[in-house]
Image: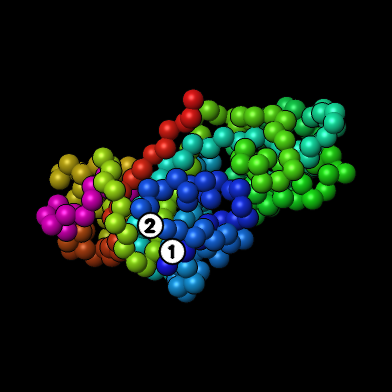
Amino acid sequence: MPKKLAFLGPRGTFSEEAARSLPIGLPIDYVPYPSIIEVLNAVAKEEVDYGIVPIENSIEGTVNSTLDWLIHEVDLPILAELALPITQNLLMARREQQVPLSAITRVMSHPQAIAQSFHFIREHMPQAVVENVNSTALAAQTVSEHPEELWAAIGTRLNADIYPLEVVRPHIQDFSNNYTRFVLVGQQSLDLPESNREKTTILVTLPEDFPGALYQVLAAFAWRKLNLSRIESRPTKKGLGSYFFVIDIEQKMDDVLLPGAFAEIEAIGCQVRQLGTYPFYRQEVNS
């Protein structure tokens, strides 16, 4: 029986593209859900076996809803990570005559896609109302269902194959080096192919009465020559100035280095929670 993998839907999102790009050597049924939170909850409730969600974009930074839900609401290990190149396109309903961009009255997409195309929108469609929706594919679907309106969506080329839309302007993102990191989560392990890059992600809670604790946390990795590719603070939601630190370590879990670092960190009163140790894959831009 195929495994079920949830992604942020409807069909045609970058999340679906990421899901289908992962090197999973098993039969998979891809199941769309209307929000990131619902994807994660579906995995936690075992409605599906796995879920894939965006966690960071190279232009707009962290997807806070993903990170906060993984920290506060569900206990799902990260099984893999994929960096997917993101190309934003302006889509409209198919017409016999192309509509000038200055005539577009509404532009809709996911907030990240809107932000990634901010300068293009401001330069070419300053008159248009900008509307945020839950996904790029939902924006495309909505535009396709109202062909009489001069509306446009921002999203993947895949949407022009799924809906009666055409790409009126390709590559409208403000920066060419636009990647989104997606993480695969699930309660069941997966036998994934080897990668030349492995990562471990942890959540560190500092003691409130220990000045310089963060410095000592970082020192535990530094003298072991363990590279940290990302450090981010997120509120504990217990009060102002109270934070977790999410740390990505460029090292898979081993028997010596990482356990030693974690023990040293815990010895100064910190709490360490492992969010996953996993392979990292990167998809290159198609030429």
* Left or right of residue 94: residue 183: left
**In-image side of 283 versus 144 (left or right):** left
- Residue 275 in magenta? no
Residue extending furthest toward the top: 287
Between 271 and 94, the one lying in front of the other is 94
Task: List the residue tagged with mark 1.
Answer: 2
> Quick one: which residue is furthest to the front in this view?
1
Per the rendering, the mark at residue 77 is: none
Q: Which residues are magenta?
A: 244-260
Residue 18 visible in the picture: yes
Q: Residue beneath label 2, please?
A: 26
Residue 32 in picture, x, y percent from top left? 57, 59
Task: Based on the picture, tell me whether residue 258 belongs to the magenta stretch.
Answer: yes
Q: Position of residue 111 (x, y in %)?
A: 63, 47
In the image, what residue type sits under mark 2?
A: Leu
Of residues 46 and 26, the one nearer the viewer is: 26
Residue nearer the viewer, 158 or 132: 158
**Observer-nearest residue: 259 or 100?**
100
Seen in the picture, residue 69 relative to 97 is either above or below; the reply is below
Q: Residue at x 61, y 29 (%)?
A: 171
- Relative to 271, is 151 above or below? above
The crowd level at tag 2 (other Cα within 10 Å; few <14, some 14-19, many 20+) is few
At horizontal 15% and vertical 44% (from top left) the residue drawn is 223
Q: Quadrant of the N terminus?
A: bottom left
